[in-house]
């Protein structure tokens, strides 16, 4: 009887040990899955950061030097900005590999006013795509742009284009989402844009938003907005 009792104890202990090992393996497996997921998310964030194109109007001096630009060109950019159109920046980039540079730095084009030929300054945009950009004007929102251009390229490519273009917003009616889609406009500035509605004119916009930014930034922001005329 004692032998049977001992045997039962041994069997129970072995079963417990096997169960513990199994649980340990499952815990390790779950932990590894979490780690792998986090690593993938980090890599995705890093990839997104690499693919983000620097806005020449917002770049720091350190950012510009990091692009391999000469001190003379860096100084010119800092002195002459904000560039209201990409063409003004393009004009001062002499003896520069523009094709390579524009994959890293740009001044976003106004989708509704830019000449069709100028869209070809965007890396990877040729005659056909430049025509499609022009074809669907006027754009009333970024959503419209994504929907129309998404007929020709995948989501990743559409999102890449958003580094290079913007849709100006109507100050009194634009959604929060569309305002936040403007180059260099974040949550705080979006709130300020909405705070002073309705705007009677652009002079009021300059007065109110000028409380938060300097003259150069105000000039840059003004190019991103408009008011409907009766």
Image: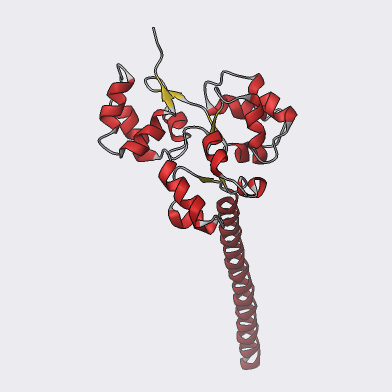
Q: Nearer the viewer, residue 11 or 4?
A: 11
> In the image, 157: left or right of 64?
right
> In the image, 132: left or right of 56?
right
Res. 163 visible in picture: no
Q: Nearer the viewer, residue 51 or 77?
A: 77
Whole-percent x and y of residue 81? Answer: 43, 41
The residue depicted at 62 percent of the width and 47 percent of the height is 103
Q: In the orientation shown, which residue stands out farthest toward the bottom?
A: 3
> In the image, 25: left or right of 168?
right
In the picture, residue 40 is in which quadrant? bottom right
In the image, is residue 160 above or below residue 176?
Answer: below
Name the quadrant of the N terminus: bottom right
The residue depicted at 69 percent of the width and 24 percent of the height is 132
Res. 87 visible in picture: yes
Q: Nearer the viewer, residue 208 or 189?
A: 208
Name the quadrant of the C terminus: top left
In the picture, residue 175 is in which quadrant? top left
The residue depicted at 47 percent of the width and 32 percent of the height is 84
The residue depicted at 44 percent of the width and 40 percent of the height is 184
Whole-percent x and y of residue 114? Answer: 57, 26
In the picture, residue 228 is in which quadrant? top left
């Amino acid at each position: 009887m004692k032998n049977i009792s001992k045997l039962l104890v041994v069997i129970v202990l072995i079963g417990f040990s096997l169960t513990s090992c199994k649980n340990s393996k499952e815990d390790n497996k779950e932990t590894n899955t979490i780690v792998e997921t986090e690593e993938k998310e980090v890599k995705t964030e890093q990839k997104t950061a690499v693919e983000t194109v620097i806005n020449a109007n917002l770049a720091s001096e350190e950012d510009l030097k990091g692009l391999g630009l000469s001190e003379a060109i860096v100084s010119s950019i800092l002195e002459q900005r904000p560039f209201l159109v990409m063409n003004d920046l393009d004009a001062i980039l002499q003896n520069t590999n523009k094709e390579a540079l524009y994959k890293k730095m740009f001044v976003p084009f106004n989708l509704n006013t830019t000449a069709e030929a100028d869209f070809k300054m965007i890396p990877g945009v040729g005659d056909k795509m430049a025509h499609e950009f022009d074809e669907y004007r006027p754009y009333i929102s970024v959503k419209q742009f994504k929907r129309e251009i998404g007929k020709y390229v995948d989501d990743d490519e559409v999102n890449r284009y958003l580094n290079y273009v913007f849709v100006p917003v109507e100050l009194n009616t634009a959604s929060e989402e569309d305002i936040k889609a403007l180059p260099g406009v974040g949550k705080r500035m979006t709130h300020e844009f909405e705070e002073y509605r309705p705007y009677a004119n652009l002079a009021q916009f300059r007065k109110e938003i000028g409380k938060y930014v300097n003259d150069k930034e105000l000039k840059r922001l003004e190019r991103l907005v408009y008011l409907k005329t009766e």
